[in-house]
Amino acid sequence: MADFSEKVIYQIYPKSFQDSNGDGIGDLKGIIRRLDYLKDLGVDYLWLTPIFPSPQRDNGYDVADYCSVNPMYGTMEDVEELIAEGRKRGIGLMFDMVFNHTSTEHVWFQKALAGEKKYQDYYMFRDGEPDQPPTNWVSKFGGPAWEYVPSLKKWYLHLFDVTQADLNWENPAVREELKQVIRFWKEKGIQGFRFDVVNLISKPEVFENDYEGDGRRFYTDGRHVHEFLKELVADTGIADMITVGEMSSTSLENCVRYSNPAEKELSMCFSFHHLKVDYKDGQKWELMEPDRMALKGLFKTWQEGMQAGHGWNALFWCNHDQPRIVSRLGDEKTYWKESAKMLAASIHLMRGTPYIYQGEEIGMQNPHYQSIEKYRDVESINYYRILMEQGKSQEETLEILAARSRDDGRTPMQWDGQANAGFSQSEPWIPMGDTSQEITVEKQLGDETSILSFYKKLVALRKELPVIARGDIAMIEAENADVLAYRRTLDDQELIVWNNLTGGETEVGAPEGTGWKLVLGNYEDGQAEGNADGRMRLRPYETVALGRNL
């Protein structure tokens, strides 16, 4: 399988990136308009979240037709132009394949509802009585994971929204249909694929109640998932293309298998454990201060564990489902610039392939919505009701949503000081954030001290220094809760990276020996100060990367 260690991927949420026709919704022509900006940033691939026809119940992750383009984003000709214009700039396009489920508006599901046995076998239908679902599993979006269809006297499984019916991968005809989708887009010139919640595709042979949890232990990293992925990759000829799997509640052992080149499954994996360190009792909708020792431990487990098993990580803080990381683990006020840079360096210099989510490179923040009317996300709207029913006050509920909602990452890209931050001439489909005029690309272009310039340095360093792209990693400063630090090595090349996770000063052990030079820092006056006793003082949210023999 191909080596993507030097590559950097930029994620675009098309609905919120750039509107070209004034309807308040981002589109493909808008992306084309911004390709020179992305080339200047230095990224190699653009991952677009789904642009297929969809009722948009889950913002495109409810696909009604895998081989067409949603008119609100443009046309097939626009896709072809985007592919061609990206290629001219050395940028490949990655499409997002939602293969665990389809929209209930998909023709396959509609034929199933009409009684066609062939298409009922495309989904997870089970006979039953109206008051007795097949299991007690809970949907990821809240409520039961089963929906009853009175006309069929059957239940269908939906691990997500009720309009997202799970496909039956045990059926070879389903697997062949999905292979055809990959072949279609590969023929068009798509150069990579991201597979949505792909570790959930293999369901158990026998469905049973879960009296310990919500059901996920029965279908996560399921019994045939590895063979299904091997088959999909082999039969579509995408083994040497860049592929990434979104792995829900997965394990290190499985991610090693998914991404070890010898297995011929995927190039890399997204795992999410590090983004749950501020979940109280593991619950997304319960707030707490981030557990920094847990964060450090998870990076150690996954960085060193994937290395030992020859697996490969996708490195990320933000995406379309996550809050803005500078709002979550950084400082939006006093140390906004320093903390945004530190958080970027902390993962970009690790072992794996970094992902930049639109707006992350300029330090965009959560929008801090004050009313439920501003939210668009189905999960957030569902949980507003659920949390209120649990007895939380409206103030508490809105505070939780402001910190956790998927809409935190979905506000429009902030380009300049024009109306709606240059995203659209019309009112956007979702309200702008409250810093939309202060934090913009325009303000940071040409500023060597900007967050944007820092991201450009990180992207360039990965391509310049083999130790970053291909070196081994070992975590250091294990007992210091304030600092995420690691050593990268490749032959005689060394790089040590310290990241102060806090708004206070802290000390770390200075490197031994001579010949160390500053490779990267996020303070304008150089690196942290050293002490006579061999210690080094880190300022609030400071990043220091020292290297030798580079």
Image (spheres, rainbow, N blue to C red):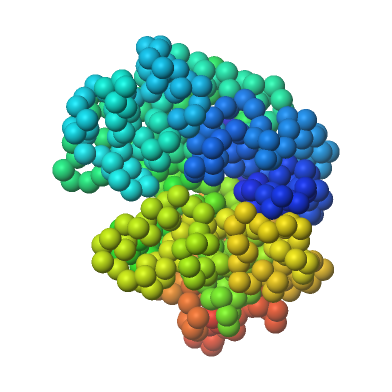
Query: Would you say residue 52 is visible in this rendering?
Result: yes
Residue drawn at (54%, 66%) of the image: 366
* Front residue of 233 and 385: 385
Residue drawn at (44%, 38%) of the image: 197
Residue drawn at (25%, 39%) of the image: 137
Percent position of residue 549, x then y: 67, 60
Percent position of residue 539, x then y: 55, 82
* Front residue of 17 and 521: 17
Percent position of residue 371, x then y: 48, 67
- Above or below — where is 146 with respect to 424? above
Image quadrant containing the N terminus? top right
Q: Is residue 206 left or right of residue 47?
A: left
Residue drawn at (73%, 74%) of the image: 449
- Above or below — where is 63 with respect to 57? above
Quarter-wise, where is residue 339 in the image? Answer: bottom right
Q: Residue furthest bottom?
A: 532
Q: Residue furthest front?
A: 151
Percent position of residue 550, x then y: 68, 59
* Front residue of 513 and 351: 351
* Front residue of 248 and 544: 248
Query: Would you say residue 461 is visible in this rendering?
Result: no
